[in-house]
Amino acid sequence: MVKVLGQSDECLEQIRSLFEHSLHGDKRVECEIFRNGPNDVWIRVLDPNYADISLFARYITFWIHIKQLSEQYGMQISRLILLPPSQVSDWPTSEEFDAKKPKEGF
């Protein structure tokens, strides 16, 4: 499931659509996207399968998908967090997603 947190826009919808397709409807995977600033998009993907995959391999896999976005939208992604659910509390910036409170005004 892919969720846009806060107000959506064309860029976030393009990313959401791409990830919906890339995740193949796997119900165990949670993807959250939010705009942290005018040109600043954060993405967190929680996938149980990541427990057995190196951090480097996770990022390579996702950047292959992100390259399908236009340069205008791809450049706005500043934070990509790819974790198994068991590691959420170990990742400091993950709390931004748990609070579900993007910065005011964006």
Image (spheres, rainbow, N blue to C red):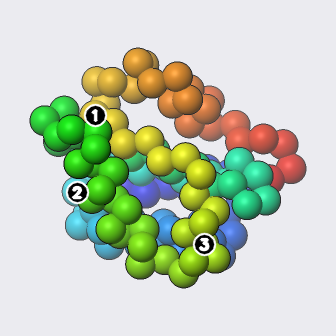
Q: Residue furthest top?
A: 90
| Residue at numbered disc 2 | 26
Residue 3 in picture, x, y percent from top left: 50, 55
Q: Residue at x 61, y 32 (%)?
A: 96
SS of the residue at dot 2? loop
- Horizontal side of residue 68 vs 95, given as left or right: left
| Residue at numbered disc 1 | 84
SS of the residue at dot 3? helix
Give above or below for 98 relative to 31: above
| Observer-nearest of 100 and 73 | 73
SS of the residue at dot 1? loop
Residues packed near mark 3 inside 10 Å, few (<14), some (14 to 19) or many (20 plus):
some
Q: CA distance from mark 3 to mark 2?
A: 24 Å
Q: Quadrant of residue 98?
A: top right
The N terminus lies in quadrant: bottom left
Q: Residue at x 41, y 78 (%)?
A: 68
| Residue at numbered disc 3 | 73
State which mark lies toward you, 1 or 3.
3
Q: Amino acid at mark 2?
A: Asp
Residue 47 shows up from this direction: no
Residues packed near mark 1 inside 10 Å, few (<14), some (14 to 19) or many (20 plus):
some
